Amino acid sequence: MAKGLPAAAVAAMLLVTPLPASAAGGSLWHYSFQNGIGEYLTGQWDSPAGGALALSCKDRGVSIMAQIKGAAPPPDSILRLTVSNRAGSRDHGFQTDRMGAVEITDIGRASHFNRLWNDLRTHDIVTLRYADGRTHVASLAGAMKTLPARPCG
């Protein structure tokens, strides 16, 4: 079970079964919809190696959840997501809650999240960086196909 995540988030994560990149048409991103929650995921959740990034969309809000080697970000810290391509990189910082997740209640008013969403679609890699120094680099292959143009659209 994922430590530090709400039960609903863990349940949503367990519903996502990552496909091999070849089965998903080369995409490393996956989408599932269950119980009113749209889940965009890259990586493998609860893996002792590597990392994962999940964007869970429900109603007008979104949760950003990350793991590095199966561990969520430290609670009440800044989760940094740096997207990069040959043209450069852009850093996005989000405040985690006491469970290590980022909760955004209204994505329509969250311009910083909307910029991240667009950057995930248009860049090559994303680096997850925790306040304690842990990092993980993930490919954004297939993100443009999987993530709709409008955040959580």
Image (cartoon, rainbow, N blue to C red):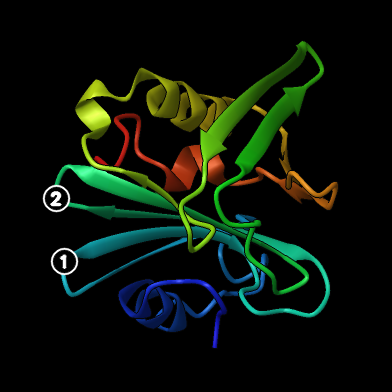
Residue, disc 1: 36
The kind of residue tagged 1 is Gly
Residue 149 appears at what percent x and percent y?
A: 35, 30
Q: Which residue is mark 2?
A: 59
Q: Who's the residue at 78% across and 13% down the image?
A: 88
Q: Secondary structure at mark 2?
A: loop
63 displayed left or right of 52: left
4 w.r.t. 67: above or below: below
Q: Quadrant of the N terminus?
A: bottom right
Helix, strand or loop for disc 1: loop
- Whether residue 2 is situated above or below residue 23 in the rendered picture: below
Residue furthest bottom as drawn: 1
* Residue 91, position as x, y percentages in the image: 67, 23
Q: Position of residue 126 (x, y in %)?
A: 70, 39
Regarding residue 54, the answer to whether it shows in the image is no
Q: Nearer the viewer, residue 77 or 25?
A: 77
120 is higher (above) or lower (below) than 25: above
10 Å crowding of disc 1: few (<14), some (14-19), many (20+) = few
Q: Please, which residue is most extreme toward the top here?
A: 87
The reply to whether residue 1 is in sight is: yes
**What number of labels is visible?**
2
